[in-house]
């Protein structure tokens, strides 16, 4: 993988308007793994693209009505088929973590890269997703000198508020591959 201006070359870039600048002199030293499906347990990648691009049609499903006004993004999405999509330059702050804290540092969006996996807490992730995720994590670890100990789930930085990537995420597989 090669990145220019925080965007990985050779993968699909779907620009999200939901980002801003990171605070000055803030080093990226955290990777947050999430899970997303819209509506829950439905794997329609286009709906995730639409959500991160503020183009979601809330009339398609009752659940979508409840999130229609949210402004959310992530740096990356790994689809159910193991395809990697990028929404925000890694040099910018994506809006993925919300109210969060890691090692007594608040506002994890300031110093993290967000990676969404198309999935949910109740279902297993696909092998192709793990393969893609591991390749991405290896790149990010080298590119940003991130400790593998600083790869966490959304649930770890927002306990009680978030549960993803959930109990079916295979942390042992990911950590052993790094």
Image: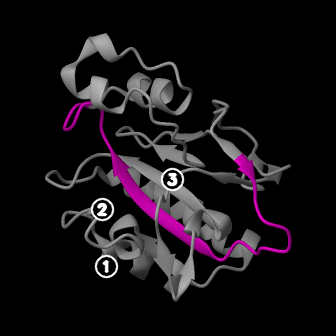
Give the number of the disc on residue 162: 2
Q: Which residue in the structure is indicated by mark 3?
A: 96
Which numbered disc, 1 or 3, marks the residue closer to the eye? 3
Residue 178 seen in render? no
Position in image of residue 147 (x %, y %): 60, 85
Residue drawn where x is 39% and y is 14% of the image:
57
Q: Is residue 22 left or right of residue 126?
A: right
Callout 1: helix, strand or loop? Answer: helix
Task: Evaluate if marks 1 and 2 touch, with contact meaning CB atoms under 8 Å apart.
Answer: no
Task: Evaluate if marks 3 and 2 touch, with contact meaning CB atoms under 8 Å apart.
Answer: no
Which numbered disc, 1 or 2, marks the residue closer to the eye? 2
- Around disc 3, counting alpha carbons within 10 Å, would you say few (fewer than 14), some (14 to 19), or many (20 or more)? many
Earlier sequence position, callout 1 versus callout 2: 2
Q: Is residue 60 magenta?
A: no
- Around disc 2, counting alpha carbons within 10 Å, would you say few (fewer than 14), some (14 to 19), or many (20 or more)? some
Instruction: State how far apart marks 1 and 3 are (Cα).
Output: 24 Å
Which residues fall within the magenta stretch? 20-42
Q: Which residue in the structure is indicated by mark 1?
A: 172
Earlier sequence position, callout 3 versus callout 2: 3
The quadrant of the rendering that contains the N terminus is bottom right
- Around disc 1, counting alpha carbons within 10 Å, would you say few (fewer than 14), some (14 to 19), or many (20 or more)? few
Residue drawn where x is 71% and y is 74% of the image:
142
With respect to residue 88, does 177 lie above or below? below
With respect to residue 124, does 88 lie above or below? above
Main SS of residues in magenta = loop
Earlier sequence position, callout 1 versus callout 3: 3
Instruction: State how far apart marks 3 and 2 are (Cα).
Output: 12 Å
């Amino acid at each position: 993988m090669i990145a220019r201006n925080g965007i990985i070359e050779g993968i699909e870039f779907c620009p999200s308007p939901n980002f801003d600048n990171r605070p000055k002199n803030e080093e990226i030293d955290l990777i947050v793994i999430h899970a997303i499906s819209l509506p829950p347990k439905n794997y329609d990648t286009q709906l995730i693209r639409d959500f991160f691009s503020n183009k979601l049609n809330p009339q398609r499903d009752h659940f979508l009505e409840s999130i229609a006004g949210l402004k959310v993004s992530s740096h990356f999405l790994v689809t159910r088929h193991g395809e990697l999509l990028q929404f925000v330059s890694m040099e910018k702050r994506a809006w993925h973590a919300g109210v969060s804290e890691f090692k007594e540092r608040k506002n994890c969006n300031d110093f993290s890269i967000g990676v969404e996996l198309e999935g949910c807490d109740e279902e297993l992730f696909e092998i192709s997703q793990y393969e893609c995720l591991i390749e991405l994590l290896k790149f990010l670890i080298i590119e940003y000198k991130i400790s593998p100990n600083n790869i966490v789930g959304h649930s770890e930085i927002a306990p009680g508020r978030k549960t993803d990537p959930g109990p079916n995420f295979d942390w042992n597989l990911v950590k052993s591959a790094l």
